[in-house]
């Protein structure tokens, strides 16, 4: 496995045309390595979420390339790209986006079910991952019965159940209080991050900076600074 | 795909309020469509009751006749001419007409009198009491025991009534496969007695009933009858002719069509709107699924499954409800004019498919439009 997990070169992205044109990314270049937990920080509207979406194969850039594990993802067709995301990338969304009509175990099992794994086996596997994130015995509960921190853990378990090489976390502490947010990110760093996995986090929350391997600062669609930290 | 469909199933049925609203919408629409069309088919069937009960293969009549109850008398030579035609095995006259009978308590009741050929009694009903040969007895009549039976004061063998100052005696009680439409009791007697007792115009033969030697002879019999200036139709064609009359020349067809369209629109609007709301409420989750790696074709499959499952369940419930109601109605009123046939089952199913297609289309369009990027943007 190459050491570079994600490599982006010359990324540009804009929305609208003419006077309504808004440039979200301007010639962004970055690399994220396996074993790293990379933060992307910056003010609102600086282009963090756009960059995260482009890196994870969700939003196509106007120019530039994104290579994940050596695969130029924007050369894949829509179905192949969806399959690539399903197999290689785990997502933790800001608002968790758990299904309220499914129980916790079923929510976690979704990526395996999408990979066409047997339903019961997927649910059993989900129970193991709930155990890993400290929610043993909660598989039958609906997500609404869980606290915000617990729901975030469910979202992490869902992202991890497919054992992706890349984990994308969008504002993972935005819906949580300070202590819970810190404990979640600590948990991710200690239990999820390893030498064959790369985690990219978009955050506003500087209270969790201590857990980052590197912090990339964005402003006005550009990467304006890189702050290195011990992994 | 099996796991994905189970996921779609759980997302659908676990949202009990919406699922119930969807089912109620489709069930109600199917019920209305089925009920209205089954009433219509029942009415049409009953309107051809005499054609069904008599059971002749070919009916010869005046070309102006549109339904069996509006017969126009034909001269006797028509019967003789038909009997001499090629391909005819036998031909007999039938009298069909209305009359008033005076009951023992002095009240009058309208009746339909069917006069059967004296020699063959062709078209006679199945007797449940009495003997068929008693129809030849003096003043002998057979009464049909259907839902109108009580209007003749529940007669029994030996009961008497007056018909145009002629004495009539009940000599048999019969049952028929299909009751009449107009709520009038039916009496059977011989042709000769019918034309003797009931005041008639110059020509007395209402219909000539024909049995062909072979099915292949039907066409040439029709041609020969046509050359005579009269019309020969098969049993099925006569029923279709009656149906056509009621559908196109009375308001019944239009009203049934309007009712069916209204029930379709009601079902469609309830189902499509509820399904669209269901999709809207789950839009972000569908977006999340898309971001995680669900293909568009799989999302379409999920929505089609949800819409299809709801439609089929609603269809089953609607058909069941309609069947139950008709069964209950028939238990109370044996001649209740409603019939479930493959035609109205298929019609309702077709309409449910249209409702499903429109509801799914709306949902699929919305889900395919959502960009996973919107999920990140929140």
Image: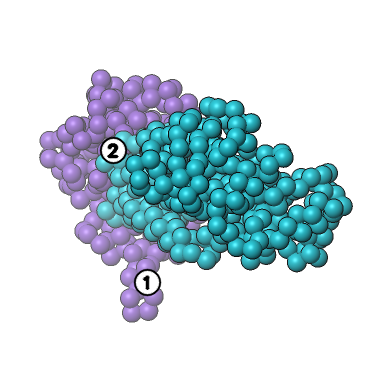
Chain colours: A purple, B cyan
SS at circle 1: loop
- Distance of label 2 from label 1 (alpha carbons): 41 Å
Residue that numbered label 2 is attached to: B16
Residue B169: x percent and y percent?
50, 37
B302 left or right of B378? right
SS at circle 2: helix
Q: Splitting the image into 4 quarters, where does residue B256 fall? A: bottom left
| Residue farthest left in this picture | A178
Residue that numbered label 1 is attached to: A16
Residue B280: x percent and y percent?
32, 52
> Which label was assigned to residue B76?
none
Closer to the camera in the image, B188 or A165:
B188
Is there CB contact under 8 Å for labels 2 and 1? no
Q: Chain of mark 1?
A: A
Residue A88: x percent and y percent?
45, 39
Q: Do we see residue B153 in this rendering?
A: yes
Closer to the camera in the image, A184 or B277:
B277
For image coordinates 44% across by 27% down, the residue present is A119
Pointer 2 local density, CA inside 10 Å: few below 14, some 14–19, many at least 20: few
Closer to the camera in the image, A101 or B70:
B70
Q: Chain of mark 2?
A: B
A44 left or right of A200? left
Pointer 1 local density, CA inside 10 Å: few below 14, some 14–19, many at least 20: few
Closer mark to the observer between disc 2 and disc 1:
2
Position of B198 relative to A123 (above/below):
below
Q: How many marks?
A: 2
Residue A57: x percent and y percent?
44, 51
Position of B349 relative to B200 (above/below):
above
For image coordinates 20% across by 35% down, the residue present is A144
For image coordinates 29% across by 49% down, the residue present is B281
Circles 2 and 1 on the same subunit:
no
Q: Do we see residue B372 in this rendering?
A: no
């Amino acid at each position: 496995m190459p050491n570079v997990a994600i490599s982006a070169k010359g990324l540009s992205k804009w929305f609208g045309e003419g006077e309504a044109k808004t440039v979200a990314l301007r010639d962004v270049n970055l690399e994220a390595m396996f074993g790293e937990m990379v933060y992307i920080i910056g003010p609102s509207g600086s282009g963090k979420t756009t960059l995260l979406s482009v890196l994870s194969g969700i939003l196509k850039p106007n120019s530039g390339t994104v290579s994940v594990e050596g695969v130029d993802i924007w050369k894949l067709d829509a179905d192949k790209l969806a399959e690539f995301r399903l197999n290689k990338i785990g997502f933790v969304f800001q608002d968790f986006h758990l299904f309220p009509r499914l129980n916790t175990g079923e929510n976690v099992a979704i990526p395996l079910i999408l990979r066409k794994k047997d339903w019961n086996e997927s649910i059993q596997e989900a129970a193991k991952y709930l155990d890993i994130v400290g929610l043993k015995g909660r598989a039958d509960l609906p997500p609404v019965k869980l606290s915000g921190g617990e729901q975030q853990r469910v979202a992490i378990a869902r992202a991890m159940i497919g054992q992706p090489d890349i984990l994308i976390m969008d504002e993972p502490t935005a819906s949580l209080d300070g202590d819970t947010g810190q404990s979640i990110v600590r948990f991710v760093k200690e239990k999820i991050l390893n030498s064959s996995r790369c985690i990219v986090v978009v955050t506003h929350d500087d209270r969790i900076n201590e857990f980052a391997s590197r912090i990339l600062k964005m402003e006005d669609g550009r990467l304006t600074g890189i702050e290195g930290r011990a992994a | 795909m099996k796991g994905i469909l189970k996921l779609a199933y759980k997302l659908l049925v676990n949202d009990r309020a919406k699922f119930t609203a969807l089912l109620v919408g489709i069930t109600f629409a199917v019920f209305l469509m089925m009920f209205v069309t089954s009433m219509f088919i029942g009415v049409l069937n009953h309107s051809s009751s005499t054609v069904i009960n008599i059971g002749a293969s070919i009916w010869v009549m005046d070309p102006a006749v549109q339904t069996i109850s509006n017969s126009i008398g034909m001269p006797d030579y028509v019967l003789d001419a038909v009997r001499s035609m090629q391909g005819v095995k036998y031909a007999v006259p039938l009298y069909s007409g209305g009359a008033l009978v005076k009951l023992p308590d002095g009240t009058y009741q309208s009746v339909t009198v069917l006069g059967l050929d004296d020699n063959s009694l062709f078209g006679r009903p199945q007797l449940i009491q009495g003997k068929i040969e008693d129809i030849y007895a003096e003043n002998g009549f057979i009464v049909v025991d259907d839902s109108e039976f009580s209007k003749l004061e529940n007669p029994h063998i030996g009961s008497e009534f007056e018909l145009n100052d002629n004495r009539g005696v009940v000599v048999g009680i019969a049952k028929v496969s299909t009751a009449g439409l107009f709520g009038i009791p039916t009496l059977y007697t011989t042709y000769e007695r019918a034309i003797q007792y009931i005041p008639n115009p110059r020509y007395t033969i209402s219909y000539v009933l024909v049995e062909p030697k072979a099915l292949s002879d039907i066409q040439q019999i029709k041609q020969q009858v046509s050359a005579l200036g009269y019309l020969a139709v098969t049993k099925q064609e006569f029923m279709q002719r009656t149906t056509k009359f009621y559908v196109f020349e009375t308001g019944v067809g239009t009203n049934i069509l309007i009712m069916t369209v209204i029930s379709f629109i009601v079902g469609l609007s309830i189902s499509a709107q509820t399904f669209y709301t269901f999709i809207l409420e789950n839009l972000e989750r569908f977006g999340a699924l898309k971001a995680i790696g669900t293909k568009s074709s799989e999302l379409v499959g999920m929505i089609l499954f949800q819409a299809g499952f709801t439609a089929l369940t609603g269809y089953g419930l609607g058909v069941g409800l309609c069947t139950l109601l008709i069964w209950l109605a028939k238990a109370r009123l044996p001649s209740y004019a409603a019939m479930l046939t493959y035609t109205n089952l298929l019609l309702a199913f077709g309409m449910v498919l249209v409702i499903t297609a429109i509801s799914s289309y709306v949902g699929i369009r919305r889900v395919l439009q959502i960009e996973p990027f919107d999920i990140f943007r929140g």
